[in-house]
Image (cartoon, rainbow, N blue to C red):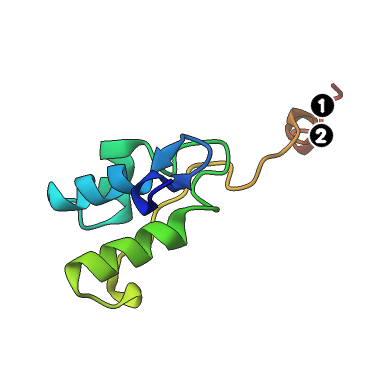
Amino acid sequence: MSDDDVVICRCEEVNRAEILAAIDAGADTIAAIRRMTRAGMGLCQGRTCRRLIAQMIAEKKGKKVEDIPPATYRSPVRPMKLEALCHAEGETC
């Protein structure tokens, strides 16, 4: 297995070569990588791969990781049981 075959986003099965190709095509933010490859759109919403993608962008673009804009989160940020929403509204489930 080569380095390019290493899976970066396990949820969407996006490998290193796909991320690098997106960066070469002009993606310079985590959001742009997400739109081009679906990396970070899986069940974990990027909690697993976000840092790796930021490191890859920084390395390829000659920037610091801190200079890469953070990804946005979609609600809910953490998985939750639907039962919790029922109780939040004062209803029984």
Q: Is residue 24 placed above or below 57 in the rendered structure?
A: above
Give the residue at mark 1.
91
Q: Please give the name of the residue rendered at 47% of the width and 49% of the height, measured from the top-left corner.
A: 73
- Secondary element type, mark 1: loop
Kindly indicate whether the residue at mark 1 contacts the one at mark 2 (C-beta within 8 angstroms): yes
Crowd tier of the residue under label 2, counting other residues whose Cα lies within 10 Å: few below 14, some 14–19, many 20 or above:
few
Write down the quadrant of residue 62 in the picture: bottom left
Front-lying residue, 5 or 53:
5
Label at residue 45 = none
Q: Position of residue 85 (x, y in %)?
A: 73, 33
Q: CA distance from mark 2 to mark 1?
A: 6 Å
The quadrant of the picture occupied by the C terminus is: top right
- Secondary element type, mark 2: helix
- Please count the marks in the image: 2
* Furthest-left residue in this view: 25
Q: Please give the name of the residue rendered at 54% of the width and 53% of the height, measured from the top-left corner.
A: 47
* Furthest-front residue in this view: 1
Left or right of residue 33, residue 27 in this image: left
* Furthest-right residue in this view: 92
Q: Please give the name of the residue rendered at 46% of the width and 34% of the height, measured from the top-left corner.
A: 12
The kind of residue tagged 1 is Glu
Q: Position of residue 75 (x, y in %)?
A: 53, 41
The kind of residue tagged 2 is His
Crowd tier of the residue under label 1, counting other residues whose Cα lies within 10 Å: few below 14, some 14–19, many 20 or above:
few
Front-lying residue, 84 or 78:
78
Give the residue at mark 2.
87
Write down the quadrant of residue 66 in the picture: bottom left
Q: Please give the name of the residue rendered at 43% of the width and 46% of the height, measured from the top-left corner.
A: 1
Q: Position of residue 35 (x, y in %)?
A: 28, 38
Q: Position of residue 58 (x, y in %)?
A: 27, 69
